Amino acid sequence: MDYATLESLRTHHPAWRLLRSDHGPLVASFLHRVFIVPNVRIIAAADLAEALEDELFVLRRQLAEDAFPKPALYYLNEWASPEKGWLRKFYRQDDDEPQFDLMPATEKAIAWLATLAERGFVGTESRLLTLFELLKQMSEGTETDPAKRVAELRKRRDDLDAEIAQIQRGDVPLLDDTALKERFQQFTQLSRELLADFREVEQNFRLLDRRVRERIALWEGAKGALLEQIMGERDAISDSDQGRSFRAFWSFLMSTRRQDELTQMLDHVLALTPVMELKPDIRTRRVHYDWLEAGEHTQRTVAQLSQQLRRFLDDQVWLENRRIMDILRGVETKALGVREQPPSGDFMGMADVAARIELPMERPLHMLALKPDFTSMTVQVGDDDVDISALYNERMVDLARLAAHIHQALQTCSQITLGELTRLRPLEQGLAELVAYLHLGSEAFTTAIDDKQNETIVWTATSSDGCLVQKQARLACVIFVRKG
């Protein structure tokens, strides 16, 4: 917080530029309404310009006709320019229409502006309890003495037993209205901050990708050393504190049991009278689905950056190979030019090549190739009666029937794993039906794969002797998620 650092931030940081801008109220209010409130990650240029044009029309009627005289698309391009840096303008793959996304610095500035409004109620108890609980978790999580950890667990068990006995006696402690409002406000604030963190994670990966591309363009050493540095930096990001925290968050949120638990608790809390008096945002009921959608968008962004980096490396290799071919053709052209009249004396030098040493014991032993002799063999016509009907028995998997099973299961829950689905409706056609489930796609549901968890699919099949046998396949957890 020294003067030089703050002066540099005032001059160069996009968030500070937004707060100093004459159009700051327009930028902050509009971007908050179209991006942050509905949790939208990417908006097409035409749609965003139309929304801004409506906003400018209303403001001109309220302020003056000459207020904000320029078209909406001009303002959007200006906000996305390097001088402003409030929006990110880019093009999707195989799409020529520009897209806009909110920058993390802009979201930080908007979040800070939201804290300037006066609050009729400021809670402190829930924050103190949260801080105390965090310190308790850190203290207990780093305790290496088994005796102390066991003593702490027994103390916690005694407290739970005492609380159970108190409730059984009819003395049920309840939170008052003030405590409920305070905790709900803190939950809302933290849930919104968590959504804002995803944009910063994406921006960190984009900055890493840009640094890697710059290094590839300026690299003059061996390709192996370059690839080693690139992959090492990718692993460093993935294994960093931020990467490990994101993986832990994703594993927790991908659990069906956790999502159902979050849905039930949100429904219960939002139905409480003190919470209803706060008039919470309607999207609070599905905030955990917003987390899931934002996390999926972050993972897709990282995957796209990896694919683009691989194509960039392929282009570099192609250019290098072309340069080598140009050099070889130049050598051939010069050699043909002096073929008829070679220069006298030594006109070309060649570096000594290293001797290739092969030890006798390193050479492979000679293997005689066994060539079967079919000419001396006679083919005898067999007289066995073989049933060839099995060659014509083809079993077709009805994909529409499998999709109907998924639609029916998702009517009662938001998502279901492939293992749960096969337990509700066992596989009738064995492995072929299991593979067909993996290829299904629909407009009514999406398919997600959790590589951190595995599940076992069991089905009953008929062996060659007609007996019923059980078969199983172990694969990564496949989750069908309902859209909307």
Image: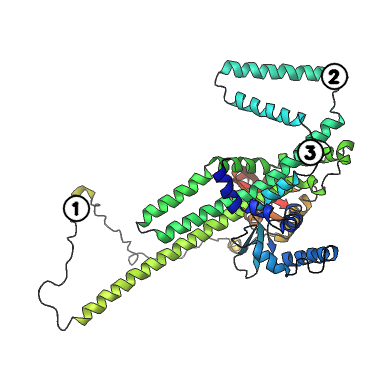
Q: Position of residue 218 (x, y in %)?
A: 41, 60
Q: Are marks 2 and 1 in contact (CB under 8 Å)?
A: no
Identity of the amino acid at label 3?
Gln
Q: Residue furthest left?
A: 345
How far, Cα to Cα, is label 1 from label 3? 76 Å
Between 391 and 150, the one lying in front of the other is: 150
Q: Is residue 254 left or right of residue 386?
A: right
In-front residue for pair 64/172: 64
Q: Using the image, tell me which numbered label, if any, was put on residue 357.
A: 1
Question: Image quadrant of residue 374?
Answer: bottom left
Label 3, residues with CA under 10 Å away: few <14, some 14-19, many ≥20: some
Give the Cα separation between the discs numbered 3 and 2: 31 Å
Residue 214 appears in the rendering: yes
Pinpoint residue 170: horizontal percent, then vertical percent: 88, 19
For residue 370, side relative to residue 452 (left or right)? left
Q: Residue at x 83, y 18 (%)?
A: 166
Q: Which secondary structure lies at badge 3?
A: helix
| Quadrant of residue 261 within the rendered picture | top right
Quarter of image, res 49: bottom right
Residue on which the image places disc 2: 168
**Considering the image in quadrants, where does the N terminus appear?**
top right
Q: Nearer the viewer, mark 2 or mark 1?
A: 2
Location of mark 3 (residue) = 185
Q: Which mark is residue 99?
A: none
Q: Nearer the viewer, mark 3 or mark 2?
A: 3
Q: Nearer the viewer, residue 118 or 451?
A: 118
Do the CB atoms of the residues marked 1 and 3 lie less than 8 Å apart?
no
Q: Give the mark nearer the N terminus: 3 vs 2.
A: 2
Going by the numbered disc 1, the residue's amino acid type is Ile
Residue in front for this viewpoint, 274 or 87: 87
